[in-house]
Image (tube, rainbow, N blue to C red):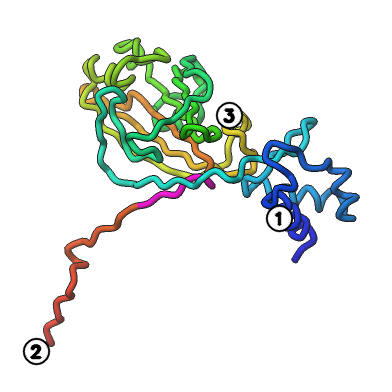
Amino acid sequence: MPRYEQVADDLRTRIHAGEYGIGTKLPTYAELTETYGVGRGVISSALSVLEREGLIRVVKKAGIRVLDWRVQRRRISRGQLIYRDPQRGYIGPAAASPDEPWDPHGNPVSSYEPIPERIAEVLGVEPGIAVLRRRRVTSPAGEPPFQIADTWLSAEAVRDAPQAAAPKTGPGGYLDRLEEAGHGPISWTEYGRSRLPSREEATLLDISTEAPVFELVWAGTSARTEQIIEVTSRVIPADRVELVSELQRDVSAQWPVEPIAPKQ
């Protein structure tokens, strides 16, 4: 085992045993190099391993903090049905059950922000231009921040349904406001990918920039214009979620298999 993996293994064991408690700091780089009798490069590689595992977060000038590694991994059933709640509005495949309470972390914020390249591509606008973004950071009750939900609204959506741009949109949410303004029924396409978080996302989710996140993007298309008018991105630490899909047999895969007739 390479020396950096030995150091990572020992630190991991100590963290899991509670020697370094959640929210506390590991020894400094200098102390770790002395303890393990190795160079700074070995320590840096070992800490990178633990960062990718979601155990620690290394912040320059602030130290090496132990994260809450006990957060339960949640399953998201990847069906294709959209449900509706009278108060919450439309609900798609998610990590929350309908009756499970979730907590906000901070207040919802609506502001014009430079749109990221991937979201701009989906919405059909130039990357970096200012677009109205609605941001919510939430989690199951009592847990650390679980997801960042960013909704980007086209200029047409804001013009037609200004209340959809507000932090509080009323019963049914911003989608109801868009459909009431003449864009209903909205249809959606979903995209999913893994990537590394931005520094801002890592800070909001209290994870390392080395820890991958899973991003689910919904693109909502107006029935009136047949153009995408809203894009919602949900960013979740990848180690906290797994996707589950029930596979169905096609007609060609039915059982029992019909015998092949012998050639004449």
Labels 3 and 2: the sequence-earlier one: 3
Give x and y (percent) for residue 222.
Answer: 26, 25
Q: Nearer the viewer, mark 3 or mark 2?
A: 3
Give x and y (percent) for residue 214.
Answer: 49, 42
Instruction: Determine the secondary structure under disc 1.
Output: helix
> Is residue 63 rendered to the left or right of residue 94?
right
Nearer-the-camera pick, 25 or 142: 142
Q: CA distance from mark 3 to mark 2?
A: 70 Å
Query: Which mark, by number, is residue 13?
Result: 1
At a point 31% along the width and 36% down the height, the residue shown is: 92
* 99 in relation to 182, above or below: below
> Is residue 147 rendered to the left or right of residue 168?
right
Q: Nearer the viewer, mark 3 or mark 1?
A: 1
* Pointer 2 residue: 264
Mark 1 belongs to which amino acid?
A: Thr
Q: Is residue 134 magenta?
A: no
- In the rendered picture of this protein, how many numbered marks are placed on residues? 3
Q: CA distance from mark 3 to mark 1?
A: 27 Å
Labels 1 and 2: the sequence-earlier one: 1
Mark 2 belongs to which amino acid?
A: Gln
At a point 19% along the width and 66% down the height, the residue shown is: 252
- The reply to whether discs 3 and 2 touch (Cβ–Cβ < 8 Å) is no
* 190 in relation to 2, above or below: above
* Pointer 3 residue: 204
Where is residue 264, by image quadrant? bottom left
Furthest-bottom residue in this view: 264
Q: Nearer the viewer, mark 1 or mark 2?
A: 1
User: Tag 3: Cα neighbours inside 10 Å, few (<14), some, or many (≥20)?
Assistant: some
User: Tag 1: Cα neighbours inside 10 Å, few (<14), some, or many (≥20)?
Assistant: few
Give x and y (percent) for residue 94.
Answer: 37, 39
